[in-house]
Amino acid sequence: MPAVVANKADYRATDSYLGRENTELARAFEQRTLDNAVPYLREVLQSLPPNFAMLDVGLGPASITISIAKLYPQATIIGLDMPDALELARENIKSAGVKNIELVVGSALDIKAVSKYPVVSDGSKSFDNLSPEAATLFEHGFDIVHTHQVHEHVRDPVALMKELHDMAKPDGGLVCCRELDMGLNVIYPEEPVFAKHIEVFKKLLLANGNDPWVGRKLVSNALKAGFKRENIKASVATIAYSTPEERKGFARVMHPGFVSVEILRKKPEVYKAADVTEEFIREANKAWKKWAEETEDGFATLGSGQVVCKRDG
């Protein structure tokens, strides 16, 4: 029986996620791994002891988490997300056969309250199902706390960064984030419908209270969260989409992605504020399909800001 949250208003970090109703989008994100989505983490993970403790906040379908767990079987990895996201994560973890990932229901904007969230399907709390060793980590801190494309979907990314800071070990725990910046995207051919689609997505995020340019603000937000400047390492990374399979994967994320008729009908006020119509969605759908399947010279990139922050006290 699926886990159900007693009070969904508690999940104020994730109820603003525009893609939460779109299972096709979640399936598209299953292609993400350590190597293709967060390669900067390889060096970070190699610097840690093999039995490190990791908190993956907003792990989604857990594909990145699983790829890390396979490489580091001695590590203790905890994934935190909404109940519906954890259902898919649990399914994928079971299929992958990894044994060192535990899952917990929680809000990215109030991680410290993780012990309060119930799973009413069996009357127990999600937190109570953690192993004793994993549960104590929320009190003593993790060696590494990680997010990937989470900050642009919360309404207070500074508050999120503070939560991540507080979950890292006080004496050198790391916070690693890779987050989208909509000013770093490139799509070729430069068709008007694609340019409009990018602008529409920016407007959707803004109308939903999110920040399309949060990737460039990670250093600023880390400073506000309490990290010292000398303990913040920043970089930029892009992913290129050019082969037929890469284009198909990118198109699945872009459309239906966050701009779909289904989500429009469920969140009409947000889409109205962004001037999105069903007519445009159908036009974009046709254009992305052609780009993915027929445009041999099609090319796209998505740019993200990255930070590795060390907590010092």
Image (spheres, helix red, strand yellow):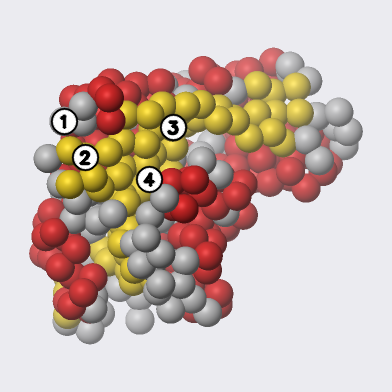
Image x and y of residue 9, in percent: 18, 51
Image x and y of residue 184, in percent: 55, 20
Mark 3 or mark 1: whose residue is earlier in sequence? 1
Q: CA distance from mark 2 to mark 3?
A: 16 Å
Other residues around mark 2 within 10 Å, as few (<14) / some (14–19) / many (≥20): many
Q: Are marks 3 and 1 in contact (CB under 8 Å)?
A: no
Q: Nearer the viewer, residue 82 or 239?
A: 239
Image x and y of residue 296, in percent: 88, 33
Q: Amino acid at mark 3?
A: Gln
Q: Amino acid at mark 4?
A: Thr
Q: Are marks 1 and 4 in contact (CB under 8 Å)?
A: no
Q: CA distance from mark 4 to mark 3?
A: 10 Å
Q: Is residue 21 above or below residue 123?
A: above
Q: Which residue is mark 3?
A: 306
Q: Which residue is mark 4?
A: 147
Q: Are marks 2 and 1 in contact (CB under 8 Å)?
A: yes
SS under mark 3: strand
Q: Are marks 2 and 3 in contact (CB under 8 Å)?
A: no
Do we see residue 2 in this rendering?
yes
Q: CA distance from mark 3 to mark 1?
A: 17 Å
Q: Which disc is residue 226 wearing?
A: 1
Q: Amino acid at mark 1?
A: Gly
SS under mark 2: strand
Q: Is residue 15 left or right of residue 21?
A: left
Q: Which label lies toward us, 2 or 3? A: 2
Q: Amino acid at mark 2?
A: Arg
Residue lying at 27% horizontally and 66% vertically, measured from the top left: 104
Q: Which residue is mark 2?
A: 311
